[in-house]
Amino acid sequence: MTRYLIVDDEPIAHRIIERYCDDLPHLEKAGDCYDALEAMQFLSAERVDLMFLDINMPKLKGFDFLKTLASPPKVIVTTAYKEFALEGYELNVSDYLLKPFSFERFVKAVNKAVSLETPSAAPVAHVPASTVTPAPAGKQRLFLKGDKKHHQVAFADILFVEAFGNYAKVYLENEMIVTHEKLSTFEQLLPSDEFIRVHKSFVISIDRINLIEGNRIKISDHEIPIGQVYKMNVNRLFE
């Protein structure tokens, strides 16, 4: 589990980042700090693997604070000031997010930071090899870990699964679950007579297909592209 700290003087920034982090099951909140001096004390007492750091804060600016740390955690800068990006990268920050940033851009930054993590003296709880628990033989369901809960999902309820960086989005009839798992894992776990890979980023439920037109598959309100490499899989449906 990656423990994160938010350092920002704006409460709304804390809420946005925490909401995004809640959708990433391998992240665990360590704390909130509203200025650099408070963060300095927090880091001296707690283990933090990843820090979301604002630049423009009272008392001590973000980068000046970062320069005081002998062994800083991985840092993702979150700021409205793009002109300081070069200085940030000179300080070896993992990524530089300009406010307002999207969830997709946020996930990309987190993936980059987590992939750069190096072992430290402090014990770190790593992300488990799989966040998907296969169902017992003969069962048509699985347990899916997302937003820090285990969801029991019936195969029949899955519309499709979409690759999302180092994660996957599992689309159901009335909700979408983000889980820390690769698309290839779902391709192996889901029954091949019920699900097919139609694109490098999509595995779909055959029973949920509404229509196929050209290089697009319609499922509910979604349009799924058919990748050139996977056309053969789709063509087999017509045999």
Image: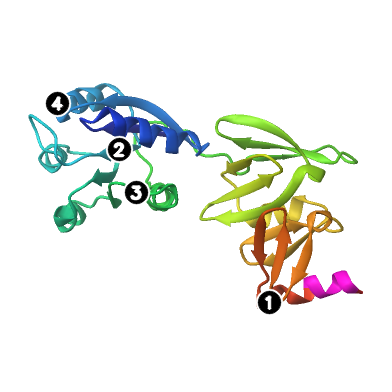
Q: Which of marks 1 and 4 precedes in the sequence?
A: 4
Q: Where residue 101 is drawn, which disc sits there?
A: 3
Q: Secondary structure at mark 1?
A: helix
Q: Tell me the residue that label 4 is attached to.
A: 37
- The residue identified by callout 1 is 229
Instruction: Categorize mark 3 by other alpha carbons within 10 Å: few (<14), some (14-19), many (20+).
Output: some
**Residue 212 in the image: above or below residue 101:** below
Task: Return the disc, 3 or 4, that comes first in the chain's sequence.
Answer: 4
Q: Nearer the viewer, mark 3 or mark 1?
A: 3
- From the top left corner, tell me how far across and down residue 192 is, in percent: 83, 58
Image location of residue 21, percent across then percent down: 44, 36
Q: What type is the residue that disc 3 sits on?
A: Phe
Under tag 3, what secondary structure?
loop
The type of residue carrying mark 1 is: Val
Q: CA distance from mark 4 to mark 1?
A: 54 Å
The reply to whether the C-beta atoms of the residues labelled 3 and 1 are less than 8 Å apart is no
**Of labels 1 and 2, the one closer to you:** 1
